[in-house]
Image (cartoon, helix red, strand yellow):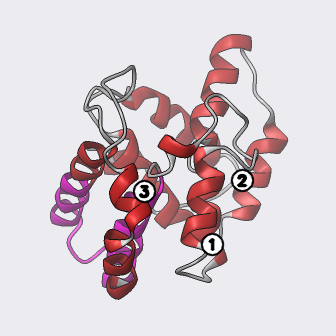
Amino acid sequence: MKDILEKIMSDARYLKNIEYGEPRSGHPEGKVEHHIAELEENLEKLVSRHAGEISEDQYWKLKFLIHVHDTFKADATPNVPILNPDSHASLAKKFAAEFVVDEDLLNMLQFHDVNYALWQQFHRTGSYDVRRLENLLETIQDWDLFLIFLILDGSTKGKERSKLVWFMKEAAEYKESRVDESWML
């Protein structure tokens, strides 16, 4: 995975797109490259705290997710559904598929914001689409890796950790994981 990440990081599309972004709600760091740097710091903190619990393979998969998940916001149509081909998640998945065939990693890119969408729905209405959560739980195979990534992404300066804790508790009603809120940064 390390060699794949090196190819991605030298790709002209990646290099252009990580320059995108202005400080905004949820992303006070602005540019995608600053978000990536913050997530890499989070990964190192988590690895330090959970020595031996994150394998080398998981580490490189997490680095891959960190570098690709938001990299296509510059090319995306704003505020479209996650499955829209022009969403940043769909564009990231399409880009990543040029480098990997791991369907689970590709699905993690596609669905990395579903937790937030479910929280928003719950916050607005007092309930959420349980079937959408169940679909996510059925789609993602390495649930521990996915939760670790969500923790990395949800533990940045502009994000409220309580939203992610809410999601983790909801998901725990349906699927067991060794990763729980004690892993939060």
Residue beneath label 3, please?
149
Q: Which residues are magenta?
A: 40-69
**Residue 30: percent from the left, percent from the top?**
29, 32
Q: Residue at x 63, y 16 (%)?
A: 123
Q: Are marks 1 and 2 in contact (CB under 8 Å)?
A: no
**Residue 55: percent from the left, percent from the top?**
33, 81
Residue beneath label 2, please?
136
- The main secondary structure of the magenta stretch is helix
**Residue 82: percent from the left, percent from the top?**
69, 42
Q: Are marks 2 and 3 in contact (CB under 8 Å)?
A: no
Amino acid type indicated by mark 3 = Phe
Q: Residue at x 61, y 68 (%)?
A: 106
Where 78 falls versus 139 (above or below)?
above
Label 1 vs label 2, nearer the camera: 1
Q: Nearer the viewer, residue 69 or 14?
A: 14
Q: Residues within 10 Å of mark 1 (few under 14, many from 20)?
A: some
Evaluate whether residue 54 shows in this view: no
- Distance from the alpha carbon under mark 3 to that under mark 1: 13 Å
Dot 2 or dot 3, earlier in sequence: 2
Q: Is residue 62 left or right of residue 147?
A: left
Q: Is residue 156 left or right of residue 140?
A: left
Residue beneath label 1, please?
104
Amino acid type indicated by mark 2 = Leu
